[in-house]
Image (cartoon, rainbow, N blue to C red):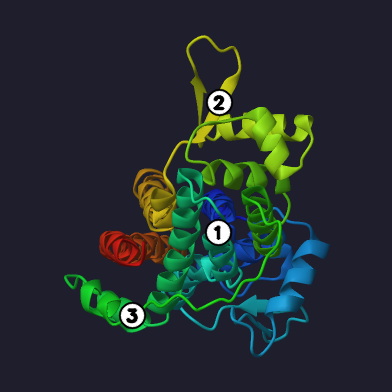
């Protein structure tokens, strides 16, 4: 990058913003920063990347060694310029395929194996007597299993629909036919258990989910445990009951509940004549099942707002007279406009899929319950 780049602050702000937003979507912040810096600028040295991302040289070097390989899912290539001994890095592809790849990766991040759930469902069916609490847990586990199954099957087939949307701004994909082609069937399980209890099943479910969560996002075990434990209850639950189910300490459960209050994902309920607090998830399991599509819409809409309200106006306010600087300003302006267009495509895509998926999951659940 040039020493006197009039657009440097806008570039830094853009890269930092994308790093933060994709980190919220459970993306690697370091790789995200490098990718968007190179899509924005191209042909950058590690020193240039340090300026744009704010990351340390060792962190950048480690990340580049991971993604600068021939078969990386994020192809970053290394090169040199004539009469220059420095190493330069660049993206061989345009903004469109990277954003598309990121969208598919974000949406299929939930492509986890819930193969343990049929076993738990069979164990639930073997319990006697069958109670409303048993029925609630069965519905919760079944919904999770069905939702993940449909996500996997659907996202294996959507890339042609996305490609058509990128070519035709008026095209709205019809997911109904695609979803109708998916045939859900719960695999049979033979269970022989002795002394099995509802508490055992709850704890086994949480343990399995913690293993999956540690692979995907790491840490926050108590928060995840408490979150899941609340969904397993058909009625509001006390802190003591959460401690019993999760087998966590009172301090850790209390900290998890406080954080969930901050995130507004838990409701606090007081019962008449009682001093203790009861807790319940702020949304139903069905809402969380298709919630990822809604959250992605929100993230992408926020990107569009930032492009329109911050980056484009700031760029427009920079006055340049040199022809080269004018061309650079035009290039950056088009880059931010391309961001708006591509993210609008994925907002329309996820909106259409959100509604179709919600209706289809309701029908499937009615047929299997």
**Residue under the image location 69 percent in, 81 percent down:** 68
Question: Of the residues tagged 1 and 3, which is closer to the observer?
Answer: 1
Q: Which mark is residue 112?
A: none
Towards the viewer: 137 or 225: 137
Classify residue 213 by image quadrant. bottom right
* Disc 1 from disc 2: Cα separation: 25 Å
Distance in Å between CA atoms under marks 3 and 2: 40 Å
| Residue underneath mark 3 | 182
Q: Is residue 1 visible?
A: no
Expressed as whole percent of the image width and height from the top left, the position of residue 230 reads 56, 41
Res 241 → quadrant: top right
Q: Pick whichever, 82 or 147, lies toward us.
A: 147
**Residue at image x 32%, y 76%?**
162
Kindly report the distance in space between the C-alpha atoms of the residues bearing marks 1 and 3: 26 Å
Q: Residues within 10 Å of mark 1 (few under 14, many from 20)?
A: many
Label 1 residue SS: helix
Residue 319: where, in percent of width, then height?
41, 49
Q: Earlier in the sequence, mark 3 or mark 2?
A: 3
Point out the frontmost of discs 3 and 2.
2
* Residue 64, quarter of picture: bottom right
Asked which secondary structure carries label 3, the reply is loop
Q: Is residue 159 left or right of residue 171?
A: right
Q: Secondary structure at mark 2?
A: strand
Front: mark 1 or 2 = 1
The residue under label 2 is 278
Where residue 18 sits in the image (x, y, percent)? 53, 55
In x, y percent, where is residue 301? 36, 51
Residue at image location 51% in from the left, 31% down from the top? 236
Residue highlighted by disc 1 = 124
């Amino acid at each position: 990058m040039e020493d006197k780049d009039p657009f440097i602050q806008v570039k830094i702000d853009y890269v930092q913003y994308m790093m933060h937003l994709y980190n919220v979507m459970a993306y690697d912040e370091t790789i995200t920063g490098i990718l968007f810096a190179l899509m924005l600028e191209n042909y950058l040295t590690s020193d240039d990347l340090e300026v744009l991302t704010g990351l340390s040289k060792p962190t950048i070097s480690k990340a580049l060694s991971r993604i600068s390989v021939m078969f990386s899912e994020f192809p970053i290539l290394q090169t040199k310029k004539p009469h220059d001994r420095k190493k330069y890095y660049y993206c061989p592809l345009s903004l469109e395929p990277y954003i598309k790849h990121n969208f598919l990766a974000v949406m299929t991040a939930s492509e986890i194996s819930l193969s343990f759930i049929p076993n738990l469902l069979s164990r639930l069916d073997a319990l006697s007597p069958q109670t409303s609490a048993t029925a609630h847990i069965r519905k919760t586990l079944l919904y999770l299993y069905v939702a993940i199954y449909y996500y996997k099957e659907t996202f294996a087939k959507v890339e042609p629909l996305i490609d058509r949307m990128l070519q035709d701004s008026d095209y709205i994909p019809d997911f109904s036919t695609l979803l109708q082609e998916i045939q859900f069937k719960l695999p049979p399980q033979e269970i022989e258990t002795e002394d099995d209890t509802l508490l055992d099943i709850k704890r086994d479910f949480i343990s399995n989910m913690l293993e999956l969560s540690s692979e995907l996002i790491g840490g926050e075990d108590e928060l995840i445990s408490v979150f899941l434990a609340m969904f397993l209850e058909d009625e509001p639950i006390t802190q003591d009951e959460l401690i019993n189910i999760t087998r966590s300490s009172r301090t850790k459960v209390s900290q998890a509940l406080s954080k969930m209050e901050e995130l507004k994902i838990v409701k606090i309920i007081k019962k008449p004549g009682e001093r203790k607090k009861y807790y319940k998830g702020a949304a139903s399991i069905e809402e969380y099942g298709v919630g990822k599509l809604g959250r992605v819409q929100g993230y992408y809409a926020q990107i569009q707002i930032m492009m329109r309200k911050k980056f484009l106006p700031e760029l427009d306010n920079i006055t340049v007279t040199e022809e080269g600087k004018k061309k650079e300003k035009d290039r950056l302006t088009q880059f931010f406009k391309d961001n708006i267009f591509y993210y609008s495509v994925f907002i329309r895509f996820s909106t259409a899929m959100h509604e179709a998926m919600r209706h289809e999951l309701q029908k499937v659940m009615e047929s299997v319950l």
